[in-house]
Amino acid sequence: MASAVGVLVMGAAWWRFGPWGRGWADLRQRARARRRLAAEQGWEYVDERPELLRRWRQAIVESNDGSRARFVVTGTLDGHRVTVFDAVTPQPKSPWDFRLAPHTLRTVHLAELPDRLPLVVVSRHSLAVDTMVPLLKQAALRRGHRLYETGDAAYDAVHVVETTDLNLAERLLTRGVREFTDDRPWLEWRVDGDQLCYVGPYGPALFREDRQPLPELRSLVRLVAELDPRLWGEAQDAGPGTPAGRRATTREHRPTTMYRGGPAHTGVFPEGTPPAGFRPWRVRLPSGLGSAPAVCDGTLYQGSLSGHCFALNAATGEERWRFAAGAKVDGTPAVGDGVVYFTTEDGLLHAVGTDDGRERWQRRVGQSAPLALDDGVLYVVHVPRDVMRGASSLRALDAQTGEPRWEVRLPDGSASGPAVADGRVYVQGAKAELSAFRVRDGKRLWHNDAGERYMATCAPTVADGTVYIGTGSGRLDAFDARTGEHRWGAQASGTIDKSPAVLGDTVYIGDSAGGVYAVDAVEGRQRWQLPSPHGGSAVTLSGSSAWVVSGVGNRTLLRLDPAGGAVRWRVPLDSPGSDPVVADGVVHVVTMKGSVLAVDAMTGQSQSKWRSARRI
């Protein structure tokens, strides 16, 4: 009897925790995540819709036996109707076959087109040469269609388009699709009537919540609009109420801010006084944060891991709007002329109106370093996956429309944001090489490759005809901005990965192991050091004061006397903090736990740490 009970217990445990049990648990988890997506977006959720799978069966499954269209979410995204569902195929057929999970999934993403589009498939993968392309050729020829195809050995890519219009195919392939696919290992679209489709690869039923379908749906919606807005029909006409129409109107000039305060990254912010009735505040955003905020014209802009860009009232912390980008928002936003610009983890650059939180335009730029905005032009550095071996590029985009002005290939890989000053753009390479380009046309003016060949991610700082850079080995170097000649070098204790701050004849840096330093801007001689074994953030300057995040675990905001490094006050943080940002007499810091703080810049008055932060 006991042995029989043991067998039953073991069988129940195997059924619950074995491949069958795990498979059903995974399906339930996916259903919950899809319902949550529908609730967040205000979309429709249906557990099953058989007609969807009947329509797409030959395209997405190999067998008709037992497959079902499950967890269907439908709604409107960026003005277009979209659908996402799973083709669920039971595997294996025999309950005694333990080699496979009980379900095989392919996630299908659909975007409705206003008209039939003659695009069949675009793919990028080395396997496409031997598998996808011959099958497509054979299928297309049977239907009597013409083919246009191209290969690019440098990208290991083959693109195939079935169309009766070779001009359309050329536009799709040579201009946008290749750029669109650079950051993904496999992309596949199909069109059936008026549906543009992306079918994910085969995979287990396990569904990770951080792999939501929104980025793929947005990619489909934007793919054709990026290449030729006319293909979407009249929806993209530039009427007075559309984003294109708004771009055509004359905009009033508004303040500008970005990473480290401005395009030269000096870390110097305008002086000011807190608004009347200001009270320190602290709010908690839905997810952890990493980069510093941008504060402009009374509004704080902050990206988050949740895939949102938040706009908060800088005086009160109240939410003004949030923009759902669909992927993690990277870096400090750039703000100017009523538009906030930011990049996301999936390689998109978004331009969103500061007044209403509505998207003006977007463009795929790939993974990028912090943006620089100057005189109506956005400067973007593409960061390769392997910065020590990969190639980088520098782009100049029209800030009003997102259209490219010029693009140049950098001499080496780079993870550094660009700095702009006096008609030149400066970029530091991953091996501490420094290059200068002309803003008018991207012509390279000089290149200094005398770096130490040590990992460098610090964006340059430009002040008074000198370019300052930090490196992974803790070296601070100064170069002549006009010629690129090396002037001097100074050594810190740890990595310098944040742009130096410069005010008058002094350069201020924080490193990863030594603390905060003040260095003579002419000779590179150290003037003072505020030691800390955990280093310090970048230094922020305004008037006659400086602010930095340092101390144990980088959990303390300090106000310093920039002349001698004396500490005026300290404010504890709940976790490591970002670089401080000062605006209108208030210093703002965000922490890795998602807290956003506003502290009186001169007195250090802050909301008590014992008082719960308001959640956004």
Image: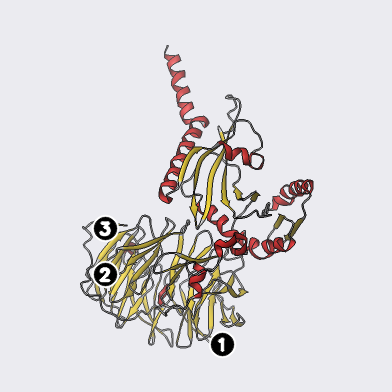
Q: Position of residue 155 (x, y in %)?
A: 68, 61
Q: Position of residue 313 (x, y in %)?
A: 31, 67
Please tell me in which quadrant of the rendered image residue 356 appears: bottom left
Q: Position of residue 606 (x, y in %)?
A: 23, 67
Residue that badge 3 annotates: 613
Quote the CA–CA distance across marks 1 and 3.
Answer: 51 Å
The circle on residue 226 is none
Q: Amino acid at mark 2?
A: Val
Secondary element under disc 3, as helix, strand or loop, is: loop
**Is residue 334 visible in the rendered structure shown here?**
yes
Number of labels in the image equals 3
Q: Residue at x 37, y 80 (%)?
A: 268
Quote the CA–CA distance across marks 1 and 2.
Answer: 42 Å
Mark 1 in CB contact with mark 2 (< 8 angstroms) = no
Viewer-nearest of labels 1 and 3? 3
Mark 1 in CB contact with mark 3 (< 8 angstroms) = no
Q: Amino acid at mark 1?
A: Thr
Which sits earlier in the primary sequence, circle 1 or circle 2?
A: 1
The circle on residue 483 is 1
Q: Dot 1: few (<14), some (14–19), or many (≥20) neighbours within 10 Å?
A: some
Name the quarter where the N terminus is drawn.
top left
Q: Position of residue 14 (x, y in %)?
A: 48, 27
Mark 3 in CB contact with mark 2 (< 8 angstroms) = no
Secondary element under disc 1, as helix, strand or loop, is: loop
Question: Which residue is at the front of the view, 301 or 264?
Answer: 301
Secondary element under disc 2, as helix, strand or loop, is: strand
* Residue located farthest toward the top when viewing the structure as drawn: 1
